[in-house]
Amino acid sequence: MPVSLFSARVRQLGAALVLSAAAIPALALPIMDMHLEDLLPMAPDFKKELNLNANQQTLWQQTESRSRQVMRERQSRRLKMQDAVTNALAGKQVELRDLVGVIDAETATAAAEEKQMREWWLTVNDALNEQQRQQVATFLSEQMMRVADSGSRPVTRDKDDAPAKTGGHHHGAGGAGAGGAGASAGSNGGSVTIPGM
């Protein structure tokens, strides 16, 4: 095959690949991968956008504070678990079934925490008006697309918590975890984390 014909076919193939890629819709972040630790650091800024009234502000602050406390306790608990498992694995007579039991117990504890936090944030959601609820839905939709487009969640540090992964907000730091947007932590690897859904 002449070189010129080969290069023309390569160009055609390249063009076809580009066009087919353009036709594929952007993939959204799976809902099961959206976690409270991704959204909670953005809560303070997003709360301002919602223009909450005094009662809503109080409820939001209480819920955000309780959620942060749960996340701090979870992080501390998991650090201790990590150390215990590491030490056990270094032992001569390690029983893997016992270690799995510890992990199962943490998974169950985290699931109960997530259910509780979803209920807290649903209570906040109930206190929002229709316009605010729509803002929450729009914010969550943006976060799902933003994280999926970036391919990974950058790590940021929240002033009150340990390093948290975030997907970013269109204003650079917005909020979530609230008004129905409050997501509960899905750190156990697979929990529905958006209470307003």
Image: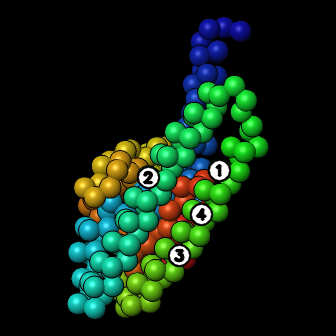
Numbered disc 4: secondary structure: helix
Query: Which part of the image, by quadrant, shows the N terminus?
Result: top right
Q: Which residue is rendered at x = 43% and y = 72% of the image?
A: 182
Which comes before the other along the chain, label 3 or label 2?
2
Query: Which part of the image, by quadrant, shows the C terminus?
Result: bottom right
Q: Which residue is rendered at x = 59% and y = 63% of the image?
A: 109
Please give the residue where the numbered disc 1 appears in the rendered image. 103
Q: Which residue is rendered at x = 73% and y = 29% of the image?
A: 93
Numbered disc 2: secondary structure: helix
**Amino acid type, label 4:** Thr
Q: CA distance from mark 2 to mark 4?
A: 13 Å
**From the viewer's perspective, is the residue at label 3 or at label 4 nearer?**
4
For the residues labelled 1 and 4, say whether their Cβ atoms are less than 8 Å apart.
no
Residue 120: image location, x then y, percent: 46, 80
Please give the residue where the numbered disc 4 appears in the rendered image. 109
Q: CA distance from mark 3 to mark 2?
A: 19 Å
Q: CA distance from mark 1 to mark 4?
A: 10 Å
For the residues labelled 3 and 1, say whether their Cβ atoms are less than 8 Å apart.
no
Please give the residue where the numbered disc 2 appears in the rendered image. 76
Q: CA distance from mark 3 to mark 4?
A: 11 Å
For the residues labelled 3 and 2, say whether their Cβ atoms are less than 8 Å apart.
no
**Amino acid type, label 3:** Gln
Residue 16 shown left or right of residue 167 in the figure: right
Say the numbered circle drawn on residue 116: 3
Image: 93 above or below 171? above
Residue 14 shown left or right of residue 143 in the figure: right
Image: 39 above or below 153? below
Q: Residues within 10 Å of mark 2 (few under 14, many from 20)?
A: few
**Amino acid type, label 2:** Ser
User: Which residue occupies the foreground of this view, 112 or 138?
Assistant: 112
**Amino acid type, label 1:** Ile
